[in-house]
Image (cartoon, rainbow, N blue to C red):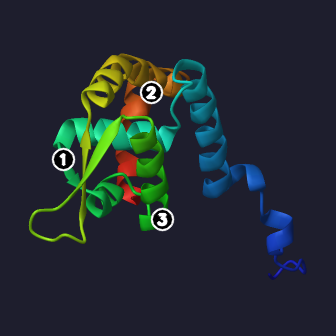
Amino acid sequence: MTDGRKPASAEETYELDRQIGFLLRKANQRHVALFAKRISDLTPPQFAALAKLGKVGPTSQNQLGVMVAMDAATIKGVIDRLNARGLVALSPDSEDRRRIIVSLTEEGRALVGGLLPAAAMITEETLAPLTGREAATLLRLLAKLT
């Protein structure tokens, strides 16, 4: 600088409260708290797996993991817990016996169908501090980041 001051260091200019990771984590914490208040018997990953299965129908465990953004180990644990509760059924793929096909049971279909209105309300509550236009912009921008 020509006025004799040295440039500010990262330590001087870095503000945690303005960092994307910090803000996303805080927003996620708020969302998860709202989720737990309305849907207490499933975790968000379990709900995501059930909701996606309800939309796409039977699919391989690995493909389901891709569709709900979970790695292979995480989706396996989620599916194992849902299977233990009788919400999903597992069967070998007729074309590739190594592949596991996951499908909703009648109980799983009824549960997820009954929870969809609550899930929509959770999204509304999460976005409530925003105007409709701001919420649409946020969702569009977040989709761009993924």
Badge nearest the viewer, 1 or 2: 1
Residue at the left extreme? Answer: 95
Report crowding for label 1: few under 14, some 14 to 19, many 20 or more residues within 10 A (C-alpha). some
Task: Name the residue beneath numbered marker 2.
Answer: 123
Badges 2 and 3: C-beta atoms under 8 Å apart? no
Relative height, residue 105 to residue 24 (above, below) = above
Q: Tell me what residue is drawn at x 64 percent, y 48 percent.
A: 25
Q: Secondary structure at mark 3?
A: helix
Report crowding for label 2: few under 14, some 14 to 19, many 20 or more residues within 10 A (C-alpha). few
Sequence-earlier tag: 2 or 3 = 3
Report crowding for label 3: few under 14, some 14 to 19, many 20 or more residues within 10 A (C-alpha). few
Q: Secondary structure at mark 1?
A: loop
Relative height, residue 49 to residue 2 (above, below) = above
- Which percent across, then down, holds residue 108? 32, 30
- Which percent across, then down, holds residue 35? 54, 28
Q: Which mark is residue 73?
A: 3
Relative height, residue 126 to residue 99 (above, below) = above
Q: Tell me what residue is drawn at x 35 percent, y 23 percent.
A: 111
Task: Name the residue beneath numbered marker 1.
Answer: 58
Q: Secondary structure at mark 2?
A: helix
Q: CA distance from mark 2 to mark 3?
A: 27 Å
Badge nearest the viewer, 2 or 3: 3
Query: For the residue marked with disc 1, what is the amino acid?
Result: Pro
